[in-house]
Amino acid sequence: MATFGSNNQLRVSSGCVYLVGAGPGDPELLTLKARRLLTSATVVVVDDLVGPQVYALIPKDAEVVYVGKRGGKKDSAKQVDIDAILVSKARLGHIVVRLKGGDPMVFGRVHSEIRALVRAQCTFEVVPGISSALAVPATANIPVTHKTLSTSFVVISGHKPAEMDFGTLAKVETIVLLMATRTIGSICESLVESGRGKDTPVALIHSGTNPDQVLLLGTLEDMAAKTQGKKYSPAIIVIGQVAKYGDLKTYLDESDDEPSNTDV
């Protein structure tokens, strides 16, 4: 927990803000600490990407402030307003849980909120969560690392393809895309133009870890057509040879590899 005084720690205010990662959606994937804090909160400031079943854990007498924060939604609150809400509620003495999907430090815009809390000398604590970038591929049986196919991976936002370095990305063994359902066609095309093979496997996992999870498998060549006109948001997209493991037959068809004690 952060306090601030002569020893370079935040001074304790009357309330406290917990910046909590809610995990990828399944409430059973909440950390024990996240669950405990959520059930004792007096104010919960919640994102759109938090799993619906997690809402059931919020105390009935808690104030719930919905701030949206899904790409493209016009009713999402401005970040500066969210920062102000957190500071205001903390100063009123509330136990505030700022609930974010996945891990708060992975595309969670938590930097702005921490800065506001530090400047206002409010007590706060960051509570890590399971990132959807790792958990969702796992639920589709897709390893983001593999002894021979993927010794590295990159997690990147697909929100602004024009700002992506496709020359570099085309050389990365495994690409995990967040916020890319509206731009997947452009991204696939740009990767091919930058030298990635058209037959590179692609897996799209919609609503990962939830009962309505959908897995769509394809390639850089055909994924745009497979997603055309369909609503797959929110989704995690995996690009690379490991994406083929979304089809369990891949595990059956491959030959036994070397002893697993050196596996990545």
Image (cartoon, helix red, strand yellow):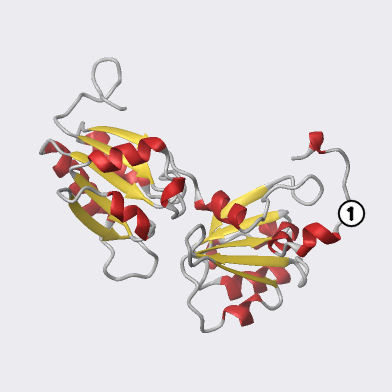
Residue 114 in view, yes or no: no
Q: Quadrant of the C terminus?
A: top right
**Compared to 244, does 255 lie above or below?**
above
Instruction: Examine the rendered structure and indicate whether residue 90 appears above or below residue 252.
Output: above
How packed mark 1 is, by other alpha carbons closer than 10 Å (few <14, some 14-19, many 20 or more), is few
Q: Residue at x 36, y 50 (%)?
A: 100
**Left or right: 50, with 139 as reference point:** left
Seen from the viewer's position, the closer of residues 164 and 107 is 107
Q: Is residue 145 left or right of residue 132?
A: right
Q: Which sits in the foreground, 224 or 30?
A: 30
Where is residue 88 shown, x and y percent of the image? 14, 43
> Which amino acid, by three-letter code, is at mark 1?
Ser
Is 165 on the left-hand or right-hand side of 195? left
The spot of residue 242 in percent (x, y) is: 72, 57
Q: Which residue shows up at 76% across the image and 72% down it?
A: 198
Question: Within the image, what quadrant is residue 190 found in?
Answer: bottom right
- Residue 60 on image: x %, y %: 18, 51
